[in-house]
Every structure is written in C-alpha cells, then in structure tokens.
Image (cartoon, grey):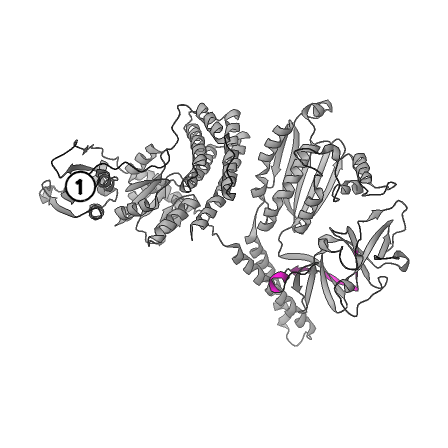
Amino acid sequence: MAVDDSRTMREMVAFTLGKAGFEVLEAEDGQAALAVLRTSPVDVVITDLNMPKMDGVTLIRTLRADPKWRALPILMLTTESDASKKAEGKSAGATGWLVKPFDPAKLIDVVKRVAG
Amino acid sequence: MNFDHLRATFFEESAELLESAYAQLAALAEGRSDAETVHALFRAIHSIKGGGGAFGLDRMIGLAHVMETLLDRARDGLVTLDPDLLALLLRGTDALSDLLSAERVGEPAPEGLTEELIQQFHAVSAPSEPAPSPRTDEPQEAVGEGWRILFQPHAALFRNASEPLHLVRELRTLGPVKLSVDAGKLPSLDRMEPEDAYLGWNLTLEGAVPRLAVEEVFEFVADDCDLRIEPLAPAAKEKFELDERKSPSAVVQGDAVPALRSDANAPAPQSVRVDVSKIDRLVNLVGELVINQAMLMQVGSALPPDICPGLIGGLETLSQHLRELQEGVMAIRTQPVKSVFSRMPRLVRELSAQLGKEVRLVVTGEMTEIDKTVVEQLADPLTHLLRNALDHGIEPPEQRAAGGKPRQGTVHLSAEQRSGRIIIEMSDDGRGIDRARVLDRAKERGLVRQDAVLNDSEIDELIFLPGFSTAAAVSEVSGRGVGMDVVRRNIEALGGRIAVESRLGSGSRFVLSLPLTLAVLDGLVVSVGAQAYILPITSIVESLRPQKEQIHDVIGSGQVLAIRGAYIPLLPLHLRFAVPDAEPDPSRGIVVIVETDRAGRLGLIVDDLLGQQQVVVKSLEANYGPVDGVAGATILGDGRVALILDVPALGGIGPVRGASQTITIPSPQPPSH
C-alpha cells in the first residue's frame, strides 16, 4: 500500500511496483491507510511522513501498537531534509526507508528486502 | 498507466498544490492563519519538490528546497513570517509556477530568476542548509574475494518487523551464501524471554561484491543488531564496526490510541477520480432519459384519463426523480470557481507593481460551483477584465488621493448562484467609463453615426463592439483595443452574457451571467414550415409580429425591420435552411430579434413560437458533421429532432450578405409589437 498525500508520489510507487508484478493499494494519509488496512490484506506499507490528518510517524506508531500489525513491514519515504524524521520513524517502528526521489529499481529491491 | 500519464498527474497535482500554497499565503498575509496554515503550505511546497525530484526538475527542486527550509524554521518557531518573508515566499511560489508551466509545455524556463531567489532565501534562513545534491552514483570500492558477516539481531530488529530471512535471501542475489547459526546466547528455557532475540548468524558471501552492496542489505537493521563485515581475504582493510547499541524507545501506547479513535469517529471524506468522458456519457444518458420521459408524457396525456388512471401520476413522479438525477449527475461535472479565481491575486500583484498602482483584490464566493468546462474557459475573460480594471479603471494613488479616494483601489471579484445561473461580478472603485470619450471614439471609428444620440447604457455597450478602442489608453498591460468584443464572444460561447454598469468617477461593474452547465440549454422552440428549431434564450433580445410598414426592402441585402429608430436586417430561416412550405411574409410570421457576432442584431423570420423549454444538447458534429449556423440538436417531446441554432455565428452568410451592425438613428419611430 502506498500512503502519500501527493498523488504523483502514490502513482509513481504504484506504477513502479505494478510493473514489477505487485498489486498496489493507495491511501492519501494515515487515516485512509488504516481504513484500507481494515478491509484489505496488505503485505507492506510504504508511507510518506509529512501528511495531513495523520502523519506517517503516527501511522507507524498506531500500527505497531496493534498486535495484528506488529509484523507488517513498513517503509517510510523521506527526503534528505528530514533526517531527524527518519530517526523518529525508525524508533516508532519503521522497518526501512527510502529517500525521495527514489530510483525505481531501488524501490523494488527495498520492498523485496523487507517483504520477501 | 504509463510515464506520460504520470507526468500529467504531476502537473495536474502541482497546479492544485500551487493553488493551495497561494491560498495559505493569502491566509497568512491577511492574518487569518492558524497552526495548520504553515504546515499546509510546507506540505504543498514539499510535495511539489517530491514530484519534481521524480522528474529531474533540478532548478525547481533547488528553489522548493530553500522555501521549505524557511517554512520548516517558521514551523519550529525559529522565524516569524513577516510581510517581507511572505512577499518572498509569494515570489518563490510565482517562480515555481513559472518553472512548472515552462516545463509543462517543454520551454526553457526564464534564466536567472530562480538562482537569485534561492540566494535571497538563503540569506533569510541562515544557518543555510545545502540544497540537495543531484543524485550521484555511489563510488564503488575495490573488492576482494568475499565477505564474512557476523549478524546478531537485537529484539528491536524484530519489533520493527524486519525479517532476517529476507536479508539472507537478498544477500544470495549478490553471490553464494553459506551460513551457520550462532546459538551461543540462547538461555535455558526457563530464563528465555519470548520477545527477546538470542540467535545470531555467521554468513559467508563469496564473490567480488563491493562492501557497499553488503552494507546496503543491512541498511535498515544496522542500528538494531551487532554486525561485522570482514573481507574473506587476509588483505583486510580497516575493521568496520557498526555496533552502536542504540535501542529504540519503546512504542508508547497512549500516543496511538487517540489517533485511532479520531479515525473511527471522523472518517476522511472520500473522493474518486473519474475520467470526464465517463461522466459525459452519464450526462448524455440522463439526457436521453429526460427526452424519453417527455415523449412518454406526451403520449400519456393524449390518452383518455380513464384508460389507465395511474399512468400520469406515475409519469410525473418519474419526471421528478429524473430531474433530481439530472441535477445529481450535472453536479459531478461541477467544480468551484476557486481554481480560476485563485490565479487573480497574483495578476493583481504583478500588474499593480508594473503600473505603479495600489490595488486590493477582494474575492468572495470562490466555492461557488460551475461546470468544469465553463471554469476552464473563464480564465481568459476574467484575466482580461481584471487587466482592464487595473489599467484603465483604478487611478494612480496620487490621483485617487487628490480626488478624495483612498490611495489603494479595490477590485471586488465575486461569484454566486442565482436562479439557476452563476453570476460572476467584477467591480472596481476606479474612474468609471468616460462616456463622452467612448462616444467620441465610437463616432470616430464609424461605429455610430455622427448625429447619434445614445443613452448611458447604450454608450457603455459600445465598448463591446469589435474594433472599438480607446486609443489614448493603449498600454503594455491591456494591449491594443482591449478586446472587450473578444471577452463578450468568449462569454457568449459559454451560453453566458456580460453586462456593464458604470458611474463616472466611482467605478465600473461587469456582470457575467453563466449557465450552470453546457449540457442543458434554455431554449425557445420555433417552427419554420414543418421543422422546429431551438434558439438559445440567452441570445434573444425580443420577438414581435411586425407591421407591413416596418419591413423595408434593401436592394441586394434582402429586407430590414425598422424598429424604434433602428434598422435590423432580417434573415428568413426558411431560406437559410431551405425549408419548404414556410411563411414567407414576415408580417404574417414572427420576427425574433437575436444578438449575433457577425451581424450585430439580426431579425430571424419564423412561422410561430412553440414554447420555451430546457433542452438536452446533442452534438451534431459527433453524429453527423459540423453545420454552419447549427450548434447541435435535440429531440423534442414528440420525438422530432430539432436543430439548435448557433445564433452568435448566424448572419454574414445566406441572403443577408454584407449586413452590418445595427445603426441607431436619432429620429425615433413608434414602437410596435
């Protein structure tokens, strides 16, 4: 599932992973992501950090607090300017991270690394 | 989906983000901001940067980055966004907008501006942060025969849902891997904590693999494990230890709970993006249904009421539901006028700076919704009107002060829905229309006769005539001729009308009245022989049955109608469309006076008026081919097809060749109906 308030980024992720054979769900913020997770099985979450309504770090914390999602791999999409955010996301329970703008091949590698 | 599609999404979204950025900046400037405002502004710029990065728009990223840095500092309360900083952010947003539009059409962006702005942002948000360097390939270290990897995960690694198995699998993609488990730390069962981590692995990776590639596999877990990566060959370089024991802080339950609850109570508004063509198909289908229902109604009402008593009642309920359905479907196509209104503040800023005027723009009703196509087509006419208002309407500050007005001029832009139409008004408190000068100008240009006597509103109307130009006011901003005729034509092409009210010395007000949708039209149904035609209500001035004495033959130009001191060329529709068995004598038929582009006012000769109704517009071009003078077709309640006339384009062809616009003459004749 791609979680990002930017449609461009979501479609970018969906496009890249779609070509690699993944099925990608989209959500535009943390709240929407939780709604999707309630109804659809998801193997990996790729989330932006800076989003309205519910940001990425809160989403990660919320998921990790729920035993159901404890083993769900979560990747955060960060930019170079939020290095401290990365640490925050990591300590909230993010499995890995990817720096925007990402290299499509790298995205596929990283998804495979955390989700098998 | 392909790459072009992604690009399109990016530009579309960036435009929305810029719109949002402008809105937040306006809120900040007007002091109606809250904590969320700067965040939203930051996010908008941040998202533009993120998207731009994906498309390699380096100059844009550089600028967005420094803007983001400033906003980040503002967010953290390190700087206060004073008017100077806001102005700088506005200029930055303007530049982003320019860079994006240049990129969109594939033109080189203007040089210099971006770099200068970046310097200015650096100057205000010291300590400066380096702009992100363009992506470079990481240097590849010289490699040996392979690596020995000692990997001892901590509990934190599992808490973050990392899976050692996946890491081993990824290592395997680099080369053959041998591994053995190190169970040395495994305690006896009674002392084992189920959530703690005890097992380690000794891995051997063979092959000429760069160290960086190995490190990359463990990138995410490096902080959550003991990791040693050593070259297999004895020619070892420095030892590499990534053994910082930094255990992550525990997940705080209390933080997460409220977030979950708020999610459950307030579900986010959902939206779906739909291709416009799908909506149009729906609009079309509903149109068919409406026509069908009208036909059924007509058949039903022709039956004796006792044959099927429930029929009419049922049909009426159906008609009511259909109307609601139609409104619902139309509403899908609508969008707030905000998307075009939000471009105006920038125009005002730039123009007032350029003209040395002080102007405040007040916008109201920007959430008023109107058909998407209409919104898109409004940008040009509104821009034109605004340019005119600033250039010709609002006086320079000194002149205003001398005239007892505030130095700062005000332009109001508003939108509202009024009785099934959208009314857009643009008013200014400037000098108003100088009617004496307008009239002189029109006479000079031969648009009215030298001895013409016109009332105020007739004079105001002159500015909409093609070829009218107040040469004294030609300037760089409005260009030559101002082109109010073009504005009127644009508005009329949308089925709208434009009117002007003005008071010398106190300002002008332009009122645009637009239909809610282009798919349905208010029409007058007229008959010509056995045919029915639809005339759009908006283009009709009046209709009358003329007296014989009012009809005059003009050699070479057919006939004209004399009415209230004006001669209006007549166009017999039966000749124009070659309809047999029509009434050839205008004094026994009806003359409908309409407003056209090519021939000014024109009197259409028809047999009779059948009634006024809403008709569903069907494209003739899509089903047959373009026909000059015909805008489309519709199906009437009785099943007949009726052509919808393209009234603004009528005239100029057919028997009234060479007709010119109405010439108003001073000697009034008694009006006749």
Identify which residue, B347 or B214, lies in the foreground: B214
- Asked if residue B161 lies left or right of residue B632, the reply is left
User: Residue B407: percent from the left, percent from the top?
Assistant: 67, 25
**What's under tag 1, amino acid-wise?**
Asp
Count of numbered labels shown in the rendering: 1
Is disc 1 surrounded by few (<14), some (14 to 19) or many (20+) residues within 10 Å? few
Question: Magenta includes B614?
Answer: yes
- A91 within the magenta span: no
Residue positioned 60% across, 41% down in the render: B365
The residue located at (47%, 29%) in the rendering is B115
The residue segment tinted magenta is B603-623
Residue B279 visible from this viewpoint: yes
Main SS class of the magenta portion in the image = strand
Residue drawn at 61 percent across, 39 percent down: B364
The C terminus of chain B lies in which quarter of the figure? bottom right
Residue B66 found in image quarter = top left
